[in-house]
Image (spheres, helix red, strand yellow):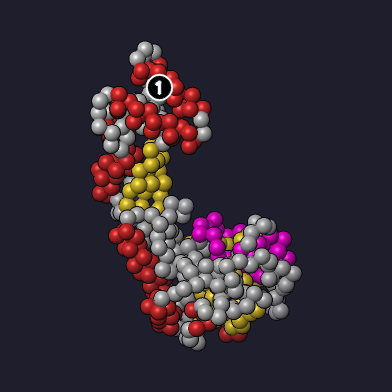
């Protein structure tokens, strides 16, 4: 039974959207370190075959330094074999790194949208796949196709969008997988993994990415270690998630209802972060919710400064509404009360965008009416 690893969506040279410029540069360097950790794992654990299911680079334009780094790491991991299926971010084009670079003999790259295979007799394994040759691929190249030799371990490695029939990124249906006859389908494109699944007798999975890049990719990331064999012609597949990410993105909601003073707000937010046990490996988006005093000025930058020291990065999003103990303002005969009554319908029944804007307007207006500086 060959030792196989499935990974995808490295996005080397990714700009990293979250964090300040300095933190983003740190994350770019760390992504390379994570890839090196993956290669070290391959070498020290005797991995014989790696399925790399696309978007290994963040774009079709790859710097020479990144290309040399990538190729050098794989060459040093020989005799492990690497099979690459270019995706929509790094398609195989005449000007791509895949076409213009000489890869070591242990690296095998699909170069066409037609389904082809690489055969590894010493592993009793065939790997089928194809390449994106532009930023989109509106059909499934393996639909209606089956492996040539059912006695071998037959694997599919490709970048695809499973369960989305209108996707421009290789739409694949469950019936396509069930009818394929592949023992395992290694997919890339979705950056989160929900484990091993089955359609017909075929197993399939997304490995997820190696490092999250924004708050839409929460949790620790990594690759899938595969154990694949055949028993009486039927596949026996086990997939184990291996963490490689140095850091994680997380989103935490903190209900700070009832806060009237900045010290109360800070204490409630700090308690929420402390109880979640996030540390220096975490990039956190803290979303504040609930009803707070209309006179309380929520200043995310102050909270980020006070709470962010134990985290790698903190971003505070204010979703509170200035409705706590608002009856006093409702009954206020002055212009303060009139201003509040004008905004209250939007605060309570508006769209999320309208509620946010109305909350900001109320806080700014009350600050001005109190004769205070507007920050």
Which residue occupies 54% across, 75% down?
84
Quadrant location of residue 198? Answer: bottom right
Which residue occupies 44% across, 22% down?
342
**Looking at the image, residue 321 lies above or below residue 20:** above
Q: Which of 297 and 157 is in front in this view?
A: 297
**Looking at the image, residue 69 lies above or below residue 314:** below
Residue 20, position in %: x, y?
32, 55
Mark 1 sits on what residue?
340
Magenta stretch: includes residue 53: no
Residue 183, position in %: x, y?
64, 69
Q: Is residue 271 visible?
A: no
Q: Which of 263 and 223 is in front in this view?
A: 263
Quadrant location of residue 268? Answer: top left
Residue 348, position in %: x, y?
48, 26
Q: Which of 258 and 92 is in front in this view?
A: 92
Which residue occupies 27% across, 24% down?
370
Category of crowding for the residue at label 1, using alpha-carbon neighbours closer than 10 angstroms: few (below 14), some (14–19), many (at least 20):
many
Q: Which stretch appears magenta?
A: 169-198
């Amino acid at each position: 039974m060959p030792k196989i690893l499935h990974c995808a969506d490295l996005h080397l040279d990714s700009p990293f959207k979250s964090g300040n410029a300095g933190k983003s540069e740190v994350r770019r360097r760390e992504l390379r370190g994570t890839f090196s950790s993956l290669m070290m794992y391959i070498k020290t654990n005797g991995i014989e075959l790696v399925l790399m299911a696309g978007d290994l680079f963040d774009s079709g334009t790859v710097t020479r330094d990144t290309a040399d780094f990538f190729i050098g790491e794989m060459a040093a991991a020989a005799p492990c074999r690497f099979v690459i299926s270019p995706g929509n971010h790094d398609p195989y084009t005449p000007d791509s790194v895949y076409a213009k670079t000489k890869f070591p003999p242990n690296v095998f790259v699909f170069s066409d949208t037609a389904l082809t295979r690489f055969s590894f007799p010493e592993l009793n394994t065939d790997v089928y796949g194809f390449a994106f040759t532009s930023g989109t691929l509106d059909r499934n190249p393996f639909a209606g196709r089956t492996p040539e030799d059912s006695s071998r371990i037959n694997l599919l490695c490709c970048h695809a969008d499973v369960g989305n029939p209108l996707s421009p990124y290789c739409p694949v249906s469950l019936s396509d997988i069930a009818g394929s006859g592949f023992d395992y389908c290694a997919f890339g494109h979705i950056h989160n993994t929900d484990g091993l699944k089955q359609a017909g007798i075929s197993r399939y999975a997304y490995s997820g990415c190696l490092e999250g890049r924004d708050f839409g990719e929460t949790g620790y990331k990594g690759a899938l270690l595969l154990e694949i064999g055949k028993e009486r012609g039927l596949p026996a597949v086990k997939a184990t998630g291996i963490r490689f990410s140095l850091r994680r993105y997380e989103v935490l909601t903190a209900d700070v209802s009832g806060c009237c003073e900045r010290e109360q707000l800070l204490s409630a937010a700090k308690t929420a972060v402390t109880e979640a046990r996030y540390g220096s490996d975490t990039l956190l988006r803290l979303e504040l919710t609930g009803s707070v005093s209309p006179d309380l000025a929520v200043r995310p930058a102050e909270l980020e400064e006070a709470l962010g020291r134990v985290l790698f990065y903190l971003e505070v999003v204010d979703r509170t509404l200035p409705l706590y103990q608002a009856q006093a303002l409702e009954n206020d005969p002055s212009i303060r009360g009139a201003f509040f009554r004008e905004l209250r319908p939007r605060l309570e029944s508006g769209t999320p965008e309208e509620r946010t804007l109305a909350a900001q307007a109320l806080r700014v207006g009350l600050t001005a009416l109190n004769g205070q500086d507007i920050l």
